[in-house]
Amino acid sequence: MENHWKRFINGESVESEVTPSIYRSWQRSIDFNVDHSLVSNQDILSSPSLNKRREAQESLIRASEPVLPYIFSLLGGTNYTVLLGDNDGYIIEAIGDAPFMSKAQKVNLSPGASWREEVRGTNAIGTALTDNAPISVFGWEHFVHDNNFLACWAAPIQNSLGAPLGVLDISGEVSLDRQKILTIAMMGASMIEKNLRLSELENQLKFYQEGAKLASSLLQQGFITIDHNGIITNINPLGAALLGRKAETIVGQLAADVFSTPKGWMLNGHSLDLQIKDRSGKDVSSHLKRVVNEAGQSLGAVGTLQVSKAPSSLSDTLWIGQSQLSQRTLVRASKVASTHSSVLIHGESGTGKEIIARTIHQLSPRCDGPFVALNCASLPPSLIESELFGYVEGAFTGARRGGKPGKFELANKGTIFLDEIGDMPLNVQVALLRVLQEKEVCRIGDTKALKIDVRILAATHKDLSALVSAELFRLDLYYRLKVVTLELPPLRDRPEDILDLVPYFIRKACDAFDSPALGIEEEVYTRLSTHHWPGNVRELENCIESMVAMAEGPILTVADLPDEFQMVAVESEPEPLLDQQTKHAILYALTQTKGKIAPAAKILGVGRNTLYRKIKELDIKF
């Protein structure tokens, strides 16, 4: 029968003499330019990449754990291997007879290798996934000649909608010729499918139990549930009314499409924030609680929707800190908020660039419009342009049906915040410059331009002028963005703000952990105020979150500080107590007088010259 394969390779017609599914696969193999004479060494994952793919398929692997050994036991354990592949055709698990597995490895029939038809031609794994149907591939039916020693049986593992999630494959020597093995493969795939359904039902039960628990106290507010894929699964009539839509038009939609929020909102952190405008233009925000299963995996989130109040003064802004540097920063932000100018916010990582951007938006005439943020460093270069400008249906492989609006469209009549602008690729800089000049945007794959009215706030921790000199950032775009520049002070230059930030972060962490409120020892402030804070406010927040998580009692003490603070305390000579108290007294007086020396000296009961000298001696910055 191998003659059929040889005749096909030579261009002869054998369609009526070969199984239809095999013949179609041979044709596809020709279209994919697969080399029939050579085993491909392409598309074989490295160990880290294989581990990453296994982590992504954790549910599938867990569902198959009891199945693979059982299927292998049914085969008698001689000259067989049982393989689990994911929906991309990569082998992620394998058990079997050691001698045969060693032989199979010579043609890369082992974990980490892709057996998609595009790579290896006709084979049971790839063809079963392509056809989404069980198949047997014997000897000469394999498109690549060196695989002709194999007899393979594979069945797709499908979700409840019939889409393939993976594949179970049994491979052995071609001489075995046991047709009934396909039935065993199909049985194994069915068992894995049932295990997946059971796991999904258990997760849904946990999710709905948590939702039901909260529902009784939330019926007077908008109520929403979102699953782990970011899809809205339920919303009550009041919540739908706040969004100005009917519930049936919201359920089943991605939260990222309904709200102004990045797609990854569900995957990280404890604080989930969704924002949108109601029909009167007021902000509708959320208070969501993340739901996890026993293994700590995210099942989704449940919570409330309510109309937010915009800040009416600087005291209502998101920025925390009463130091003179903080107040000066807020005053500058307030002044620039009243304009329509582009703003470039510069500061070290963790200084609060997005907080200041949101503050400018909230205090601006555009406060009733959307605030849309995009971190230019968090996306690969190939995706930034589609995220910024959107795309139409069919613009590229994988484009969503109906297309997708970009961040600029979503920010129309509002503000767009481009964080880490220094990481934006040059080709996207050109497109961004065109948007700034023309005030219109064109989706990828479209010829029609849309007029937009968007204010741009950009931020970076890099020296853009140096990037311009290195020809890594366009000079014309640089000057377009830096109409107004705001320089954010690092935390080490405003240590008095620690007194305001620490209680705020303690409350935030306690809320996230559902733990009682905690107090804090005064000595902890002293230790924190002497730290250099290279990670700025973000580092301080992580420090406090760590302390709350590891706290042994109702009061946070020096013993609760992370290890690096304990080591610094041992290795460095402490500042004299008198100097500490003097510095705190001076900082307090300067804060009360908003940095004015004469009134501060009066509060302290010393002369102005004495105060100037002490400020210099103790290296006090304010």
Image (cartoon, rainbow, N blue to C red):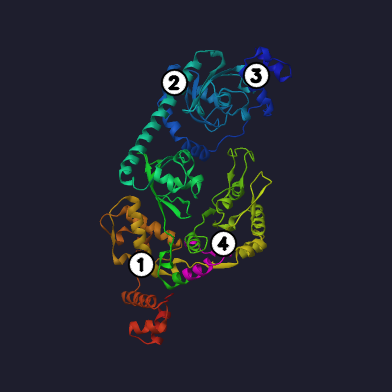
Front-lying residue, 279 or 211: 279
Quarter holding the C terminus is bottom left
Q: Earlier in the sequence, mark 1 or mark 3?
A: 3
Secondary structure beneath dot 1 equals: helix
- Can residue 128 be seen at all in this image of the molecule? yes
Real-space Cα separation, disc 2 to disc 1, in angstroms: 63 Å
Q: Which residue extends farthest right?
A: 11
Labels 2 and 1 touching (C-beta < 8 A):
no
Q: Residue 499, which numbered label? A: 1
Determine whether 204 is above or below 304 in the image.
above
Residue stretch rendered in magenta on the structure: 329-353
Real-space Cα separation, disc 4 to disc 2, in angstroms: 57 Å
Secondary structure beneath dot 2 equals: helix
In reply to whether residue 480 is colored magenta, the answer given is no
Determine whether 335 is above or below 600 in the image.
above
Real-space Cα separation, disc 4 to disc 1, in angstroms: 29 Å
Q: Is 280 positioned to the left or the right of 548 in the image?
A: right
Reading the image, the residue beneath label 3 is 23
Q: Earlier in the sequence, mark 3 or mark 4?
A: 3
Amino acid type at image mark 4 = Lys
Instruction: Name the residue at 57% across, 31% down.
Output: 114
* Count of numbered tags: 4
Q: Earlier in the sequence, mark 2 or mark 3?
A: 3
Reading the image, the residue beneath label 2 is 71
Reading the image, the residue beneath label 4 is 462
Where residue 32 appears, as percent x and y from the top left, is: 67, 29
